[in-house]
Image (cartoon, grey):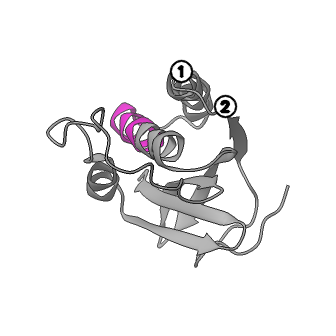
Amino acid sequence: MTVAQLDDAPCEEVGHVFPLPHAPEAVSAVRRRVRAVLSGWSLPTDVADDVLLVVSELVTNALVHALPPATLQLWWLPADGHRTVRVEVTDKGPAAPAGPSASAPDPDEHGRGLGIVTALSARCGVRADPGGTSRWAEVLAG
């Protein structure tokens, strides 16, 4: 499967595509599938752990804050003389705010996901178009 140019990513071949069920248990199921893919890429353990955390945060963000359907895509890319794992989650855009809620997440326990993604990735960003929103991150693999 080929895709359009992704920002300045040098590769157009999608490594793996995972449709995301819009359910909380999807995060752990996707992590298991991604772990299997990463083991096939023979990544160092610390890099695989970072990629898994980035996947968890981006998938959770899409499931909590966006409209379905969502899709996770992984690429194994050369970038600036290094190998990089690119993680991208695409959804149908932000969910409409439901207004103030007594069950709103505690800010001490939530809201750090994109900060974690930024800290673990060499590059990250967001791309919005009429079809939805894509959040992506690239983790250096060596």
- Labels in figure, total: 2
- Relative to 120, residue 134 above or below: below
What is the span of residues highlighted in magenta in the rendered image?
A: 44-55
Find out whether residue 61 is within the magenta segment.
no
Quarter of the view holding residue 78: bottom right
Figure quadrant of the N terminus: bottom right
Task: Label 1: state its secondary structure.
Answer: loop
Q: Is residue 100 left or right of 140 when viewed as pictured?
A: left
- Relative to 50, residue 89 above or below: below
**Along the viewing direction, whichever of 121 and 77 lies nearer the viewer:** 121
Q: Which mark is residue 21?
A: 2
Q: Check disc 1 and report the residue beneath it.
A: 25
**Along the viewing direction, whichever of 63 and 55 lies nearer the viewer:** 63
Q: Is residue 38 left or right of 47 when viewed as pictured?
A: right
Residue type indicated by callout 2: Pro
Q: Is residue 45 left or right of 77 when viewed as pictured?
A: left
Which residue: 45% across, 46% down? Answer: 61
Which residue: 27% across, 47% down? Answer: 111
Instruction: Give the main secondary structure, helix, strand or loop, of the magenta stretch.
Output: helix
Q: Residues within 10 Å of mark 2 (few under 14, many from 20)?
A: some
Q: Which mark is residue 59?
A: none
Which residue: 56% across, 71% down? Answer: 127
Residue type indicated by callout 1: Glu
Task: Label 2: state its secondary structure.
Answer: loop
- Relative to 38, residue 72 above or below: below
Callouts 1 and 2 close, C-beta under 8 Å: yes
Looking at the image, the residue that sits furthest to the left is 108
Residue 48 x %, y %: 43, 36
**Along the viewing direction, whichever of 116 and 66 lies nearer the viewer:** 66
Q: Is residue 63 left or right of 129 when viewed as pictured?
A: left
